[in-house]
Image (tube, rainbow, N blue to C red):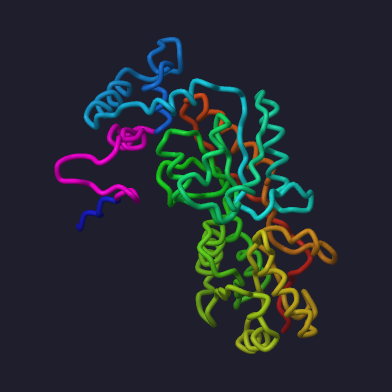
Amino acid sequence: MEQPKKRVRPGRVPAPGGRTSRPRQAEVARLAGVSQATVSLVLSAKGTDRKGPNISEETRQKVLDAARTLGYVPDPAARRLAAARNNLLGVFSFTATFPTEVQHSYYPFLVGVEREAAARGYDLVLFTGSSTGGAGAAGPEALSRVRLADGCLFLGRHAPLAELKRLVDDGFPVVHLGRREELEGLAWVGADYVSASREVVTHLARAGHRRIVLVREDDDAPASADRQQGFLEGLEANGLTGGPAPVFRSPDPEKDLTVSRLRAWMAEGVTAFVAEETDTGAAWRALRAAVASAGLDCPGEVSLALLGSPPADMTAGPEPTGFDIPRPQLGAAAVRLLAALVAGEEAGEPLVACAFRQGGTSGPPQG
């Protein structure tokens, strides 16, 4: 079997005669086969305290051996930061403006964050990103201000992974609210969108729908990928793999999902449509607008489902079939994980289950 190519961090050019930069804790962790939190704990003063957290002598020795092999030298600035704990947790949102409006889909996350932080004795620092472009943050100093806090929680569909990686590699405690497996070493908490989306498809299949189409935005955000995976798994599990292409992916659903396209799908036997939830709500808006413009009755002539909750300005009318995202619980879980990393403890948070919502936008197909 072909061995995978070794990944090289951007900006680092390995030289035959040796390294070009100081090794980081993330590399020590990989070589020792432990978490970066364990490395931080062992290599800090706390790691040598026998009264501190329970780390076996075998694990401690693995870390020390790996550090010695790589020639690891602690970053003095990072050590000063680590020693200056002030019970502050940062929250950075990759949105154009910080989501403090009650109607914003991220607001319930912040409710959970605030409650859990208060229960643990932390104050919060909210970083608006106004000086770094918010959602467009880029460059080596784009996220440097978050180091004012003991650790930082990040949320948003589109995050500058290179900048997050700099923080992770420096050993700064970071947690992303939402799955981010593409960045090695980044801690995250997330909802189980795969299982929840699969359950929505199963509900529609049991109602008698044999042709179902997913409407989604054209990006590679992990939350969108998880929803699509669950949708396709639901089709396969219920024997619904035939028919027209089951996924409609568009950079502008509100422009591309026309009445003629909707009627063409229905002529091919599609009786139910599913949309993903995003912070823009574009897929659900497009789907509802097309159904209304076509003069179709929902759920009489067509069934609709939403993988999440509708935008705040679209709550009138029947509650959509779909699932509810436990946003406050996710926010609290993110704070628990971040607090553990700040304390140098090993920790993990399981995926949080989403609750199925019966709603009133789906029923058995006509005929």
Q: Residue at x 23, y 40 (%)?
A: 19
Task: Tell whether 256 sits left or right of 103.
Answer: left
Viewer-proximal residue among 319 and 50: 50
Task: Tell whether 320 sits left or right of 177.
Answer: right
Query: What is the quadrant of residue 165 in the picture?
Result: top left
Whether residue 139 is situated above or below residue 42 in the rendered picture: below
Please provide percent x and percent y for residue 204: 65, 68
Q: Residue at x 74, y 69 (%)?
A: 362
Please provide percent x and percent y for residue 164: 48, 45
> Which residue reaches farthest left?
17
Please provide percent x and percent y for residue 363: 74, 71
Quadrant showing the C terminus: bottom right
Which range is magenta?
A: 8-35
Query: What is the quadrant of residue 279 in the picture?
Result: bottom right
Q: Residue at x 19, y 46 (%)?
A: 15
Viewer-proximal residue among 167 and 6: 167
